[in-house]
């Protein structure tokens, strides 16, 4: 998008949220030298820039997410092996030995 985000703050958002969630998030935000208003404005800006949510929203549980990541890594490894980008066991042992000495 070519246009920059408007700088005039001329509207309000009221949000109901969980007290403990807000407390934890506020602590993190403040540790980054920010305030919640700035973070909300940054998030709104990212929604406009991405033309959608700037985070992955899924109803998958953590096990499903990790399983899909594992499948992706295995596929990468299979592709690398088929392309001959592999090390024999002695090379791997040498790498582990060297890393343990460092």
Image: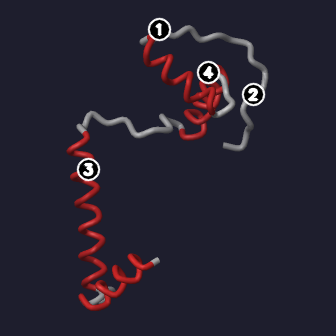
Q: Residue lying farthest front?
A: 101
C-alpha distance separating marks 2 and 4 = 18 Å
Measured Cα–Cα span from mark 2 to mark 1: 25 Å
Seen as rendered, the residue at the extreme right is 8
| Image coords of residue 96 (percent x, y) | 34, 79
User: Who is closer to the viewer here, 98 or 5?
Assistant: 98
Front tag of 4 and 1: 4
Which mark, by number, is residue 16? 1
Is 73 or 48 nearer to us in this picture? 73
**Residue 8, horizontal then vertical, whole percent:** 78, 21
Residues at marks 2 and 4 touching, judged by CB atoms closer than 8 Å: no
User: Considering depth in this image, is 41 or 96 the residue closer to the camera?
Assistant: 96
Q: Position of residue 101 (x, y in %)?
A: 42, 79
Give the side of residue 81 with respect to residue 54, left or right. left
> Does residue 12 lie above or below 74 as drawn?
above
Q: Residues within 10 Å of mark 2 (few under 14, many from 20)?
A: few
* Nearer-N-terminus badge (2/3): 2
Looking at the rendered image, the disc whose residue lies closer to the viewer, 2 or 1, is 1
- Looking at the image, residue 23 sits to the left or right of residue 57; the answer is right
Could you tell which of marks 2 and 4 lies nearer the N-terminus?
2
Marked residue nearer the N-terminal end (2 or 1): 2
Contact? badges 4 and 1 (CB < 8 Å): no
Q: Which residue is mark 4?
A: 36
Pointer 2: what residue?
6
- Tell me which residue sits at (60%, 39%) in the image: 49
Q: Which mark is residue 66?
A: 3
- Residue 40 position by quadrant: top right
Who's the residue at 50% across and 17% down the image? 23
**Alpha carbon of mark 1 to alpha carbon of mark 3: how far?**
32 Å
């Amino acid at each position: 998008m070519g246009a920059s985000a408007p700088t005039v703050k001329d509207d309000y958002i009221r949000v109901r949220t969980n007290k403990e969630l807000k407390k934890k998030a506020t602590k993190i935000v403040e540790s980054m030298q920010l305030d919640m208003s700035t973070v909300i404005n940054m998030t709104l800006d990212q929604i406009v820039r991405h033309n959608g949510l700037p985070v992955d929203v899924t109803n998958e549980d953590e096990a499903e997410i990790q399983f899909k990541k594992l499948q992706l890594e295995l596929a990468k490894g299979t592709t690398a092996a088929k392309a001959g980008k592999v090390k024999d066991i002695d090379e791997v042992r040498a790498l582990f030995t060297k890393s343990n000495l460092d």
